[in-house]
Amino acid sequence: MDFSEAMETLTFGEVCEAAAVLKGIAHVTPVMTSYQLNETSGARVFLKCENFQRVGAFKFRGAYYAISRIAVEKPDRPIVTLSSGNHAQGVALACRLHGLQAHIVMPLPVNPMKKQATTDYGATVYEASDRRHAEQIAASLCENLHGILVHPFNDVAVMAGQGTTMLELFDQVPNMDVILAPVSGGGLLSGLCVAAHALDERLKIYACEPAGALDAMYSVQENRIVPMTDPHTIAEGLRASLGTRTLPILREHVAGFFVAEEHEIIEAMRFAHERLKLVIEPSSAVALAPLLRREPFLLGKRVGVILTGGNVDLSVFWQSLEQAANDDSGRSVKKG
Amino acid sequence: MDFSEAMETLTFGEVCEAAAVLKGIAHVTPVMTSYQLNETSGARVFLKCENFQRVGAFKFRGAYYAISRIAVEKPDRPIVTLSSGNHAQGVALACRLHGLQAHIVMPLPVNPMKKQATTDYGATVYEASDRRHAEQIAASLCENLHGILVHPFNDVAVMAGQGTTMLELFDQVPNMDVILAPVSGGGLLSGLCVAAHALDERLKIYACEPAGALDAMYSVQENRIVPMTDPHTIAEGLRASLGTRTLPILREHVAGFFVAEEHEIIEAMRFAHERLKLVIEPSSAVALAPLLRREPFLLGKRVGVILTGGNVDLSVFWQSLEQAANDDSGRSVKKG
């Protein structure tokens, strides 16, 4: 496959360049605070609300920046990607804004709301039976259409775009001690790490992962990509494995992991809805969960939390709340 | 009953005084914008997010300011009010912050989430079979405990506090053409009107009311308080009738009314959830509905919308969505 701009490592300069490109195009999302959350968690919490970002998730940042580079360097080439979620929407909107064609392969299960939003932005969507099948389709689209793949996370320009979230948060909140962010392929976390440690090397960055999809933690521990074979979590956005470019950055920068069980993820979504009046998707709830259980390490700390997105089907959300209320099956977790 | 500070009319000076008292205590709530909402409505929309206010609704403003005056002028007197909703929570929190006792009478039906929040703030709650019964209990509490009633809307200090919402919105957004706000007893709208027209007399202020509880519109038309006898709406916050102090202000200042049907209220809640990532209660949705149906008068205008609160039971929200999907009963409306 023809990766877009196969730079090998992410630099702080690249994140700053992404910020310059995104200025006036991506939203500067608000930081919210809550007395109730501070009281419940015993920490001072700053919620970076990427659920209010364009397409409803931080993914717009990386997709837009990566595609803006391609539009300059290789104009008129169609863009190909594989994603069943927010990256798909980000690529679709970024392509529309640049006047480029978007071809998006979605591995099942496909969230109908995200698929609809993607086609609404004018992208062509292909469904694939699983991730491997999706990669095959994406490869043949690249070959047949002379397309350029914008990988959801294993792409330095994408990581740089995601890292702009941290630049903004630094402007908005002084003297943070800890950052909590969910991890899937590691694109967001890589961008956060490089930006954060360029600005304040004492900042502790923790990756948050569902108990039912713990591949990133094991990958960092073993220093190899442990594949996500059988993810078992409502957090559909966190089912990817780390990439060759994200693993080394996480190894170097991440202070540790916090694990969220399924019932904690659902409770965090409910807390956001009822107390914070915020709609967040399960992936975001994974990063809120350690605070709601008063993780001892976080007590008294100033904690930035990346609320990565708000694209959740109401019916899925409601069903999971009902299931959690009716039985304990939400508590059964499975190692990845 | 012993009304707190029975001043007869609301002045702009009183709103400014309320703003000075609330500074650093009430949140300066954010104004949100959305490309999708602008596209859908054909207007340029600015959402004043009082769902992020303390207690989850603008009601904290008026309750706190009214009680701050009582705390100075008549310290140690317990506070009495009647409210089954956000005013109850506002009074309960304001009393806790001032170290005063709160006695709150709730007419049925009582929203369990709002009752819980009210008792969590340390208030004593009494349930009443209906509004008339609630007034009787409140009167006897005032007599027996030597309490002071803080009326939910027919109180100039309360109106002044609610009006601070408009001062903030003016600071945040220049050159608005129209303000949309829901109306129930008219306390919020009175405060908005007096503040808005002191600052810009050309601003058009529209009251938004459910088709199933249209008493305020008829009251303003007939220049008498048309009682709300049989409200029929999911917007539980909008079931009160206008008061003697709010009716004259609305007569003078309100440019007109927009009516929202039940299915429109529910659709507006869904839109807020799915597209804006905001949790809003049905009362707020009433003010969003005219935009979602592209009300011709609003096309091309700069429109400020007061999203009054976000205290909605998840189960009530979900049930209303399901009901709207399953049948047309949501469309049956009843004149108040």
Image (cartoon, coloured by chain):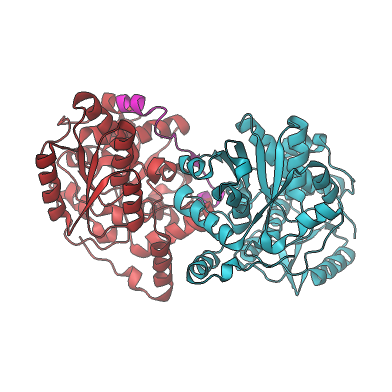
Chain colours: A red, B cyan
Q: Is residue B297 left or right of residue A1?
A: right
The region drawn magenta spans A16-38
**Any part of residue A124 in sight:** yes
Front-most of A240 and A265?
A240
The location of residue A21, given as percent across then percent down, is 34, 26
Q: Which quadrant of the figure contains the N terminus of chain A?
A: top left
Q: Is residue B183 left or right of residue A44?
A: right
Front-most of A122 and B99?
A122
Image point (81%, 72%), residue name: B133
To which quarter of the image does residue B114 belong?
bottom right
As drawn, which residue projects farthest toward the front? B296
The location of residue A220, given as percent across then percent down, is 19, 47
Front-most of A94 and A216?
A94
Location of residue A126 with respect to A327 vertically, above or below: above
**Any part of residue B30 in sight:** no
Q: Is residue A334 left or right of residue B135?
A: left
To which quarter of the image does residue B163 belong?
top right
The location of residue B215, given as percent across then percent down, is 77, 60
Find out whether residue A24 is within the magenta segment. Answer: yes
The location of residue B297, given as percent across then percent down, is 63, 42
To which quarter of the image does residue A202 belong?
top left
Location of residue A278 with respect to A212 vertically, above or below: above
Image point (56%, 39%), residue name: B43
Image point (20%, 54%), residue name: A215
